Image (tube, grey):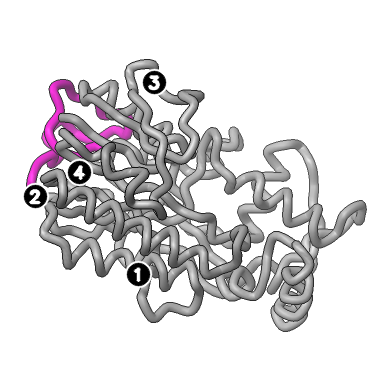
């Protein structure tokens, strides 16, 4: 199949492009500045901005499937303000759906987020929810993924926990976390086990590659069309537990102290107005769980218990 990976030069995109190439697909990566770094040599590139329809429309010609991965991080306030979430997540998806229809691209695989809701509590979740509505209302063969935090080589999750320390308590022996890091729960999934699921949803491939441990009879056809999958890892961890594991993996200790949520809200809102990378919307997100109501990994022939734990990924065993 000829597959267009929109946002394919990012963290998930580089891993997915490699997976798709290994399965025998012809892959084109669309991003604003694709330089080929981190991408498989066999992948083609196309420069375009999803917020500018005319710059991307030509990339859809002759494609059988599109995977939409473009996303702004929910952990940081985006350049241009929180309204950029709607411009990129909803507006970008709208432009790509329009281009897919124009060129007769049948399959549209969309990466959303857990908690996506057009009436959700943050700009990020509202934009993701509105994008989902557009995808479902389209006449494409759509598949939607709602992953929890994705970790792995090139990801921001591990580094985020370290950055929080440098922001909240630079040079101090303590680590103040909003709410003590106990109010936010994650269900982190390893990128090397997530992308094979997305590749299955793209459609049949000339070769079979199941890096995630998917069984040979895992569904890889139209049974995925019209489905929304919540995907998480084998463990549910609080932000505090994640932080402690990261520091343990480096042979360091950390003394976490609670920063009252009300104080964090006031402090980060003020700091956000002077260029600090977090703001009021990001504080709201720290009150929300990032876990699945149901873990749909079994739809891809994967057992949750066989997935890699965050602790194991960090080299801590177990």
Q: Is residue 63 left or right of residue 292?
A: left
Report the residue at 79% width, 42% height from top: 252
Neighbour tally class for label 3: few under 14, some 14-19, many 20 plus, Cα within 10 Å = some
**Which residue does the numbered mark 2 point to in the structure image?**
223
Query: Looking at the image, which residue sits at the far left?
Result: 222
Neighbour tally class for label 4: few under 14, some 14-19, many 20 plus, Cα within 10 Å = many
Residue contact at pointers 4 and 2, CB within 8 angstroms = no
Secondary structure under badge 2?
Answer: helix
Inspect the magenta stretch and tell me whether residue 214 lies in it. Answer: yes
Which stretch did the figure color magenta? 199-222
Q: CA distance from mark 3 to mark 1?
A: 32 Å
**Which residue does the numbered mark 4 point to in the structure image?**
201
Secondary structure under badge 3?
Answer: loop
**Which residue does the numbered mark 1 point to in the structure image?**
129
Earlier in the chain: of badge 3 and badge 2, it is 3
Q: Is residue 295 left or right of residue 33?
A: left
Residue 77: % across, % down: 62, 63
Secondary structure, magenta segment, majority class: loop
């Amino acid at each position: 199949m000829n597959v267009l990976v929109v946002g394919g030069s990012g963290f998930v995109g580089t891993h997915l492009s490699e997976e798709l190439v290994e399965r025998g697909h012809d892959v084109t990566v669309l991003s604003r500045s694709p330089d080929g770094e981190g991408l498989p040599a066999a992948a083609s590139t196309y420069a375009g901005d999803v917020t500018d329809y005319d710059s991307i429309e030509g990339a859809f010609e002759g494609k059988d499937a599109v995977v939409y991965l473009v996303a702004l991080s929910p952990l940081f306030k985006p350049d241009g303000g929180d309204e950029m979430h709607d411009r990129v997540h909803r507006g970008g998806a709208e432009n790509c759906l329009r281009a897919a229809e124009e060129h007769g691209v049948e399959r549209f695989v969309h990466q959303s987020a857990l908690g996506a809701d057009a009436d959700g509590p943050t700009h990020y979740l509202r934009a993701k929810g509105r994008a989902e509505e557009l995808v479902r209302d389209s006449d494409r063969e759509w598949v939607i993924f709602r992953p929890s935090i994705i970790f792995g080589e090139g990801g921001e999750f591990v580094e985020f926990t370290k950055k929080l320390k440098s922001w909240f308590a630079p040079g101090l022996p303590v680590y103040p976390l909003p709410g003590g890091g106990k109010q936010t729960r994650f269900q982190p999934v390893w990128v090397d086990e997530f992308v094979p699921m997305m590749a299955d949803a793209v459609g049949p491939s000339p070769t079979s590659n199941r890096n995630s441990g998917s069984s040979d009879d895992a569904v890889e056809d139209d049974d995925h069309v019209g489905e929304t999958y919540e995907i998480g890892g084998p463990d549910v961890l609080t932000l505090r537990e994640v932080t402690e594991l990261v520091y343990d993996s480096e042979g360091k200790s950390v003394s976490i102290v609670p920063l009252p949520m009300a104080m964090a809200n006031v402090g980060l809102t003020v700091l956000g107005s002077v260029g600090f990378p977090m703001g009021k919307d990001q504080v709201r997100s720290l009150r929300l769980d990032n876990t699945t109501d149901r873990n749909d990994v079994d739809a891809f022939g994967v057992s949750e218990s066989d997935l890699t734990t965050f602790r194991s990924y960090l080299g801590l065993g177990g």
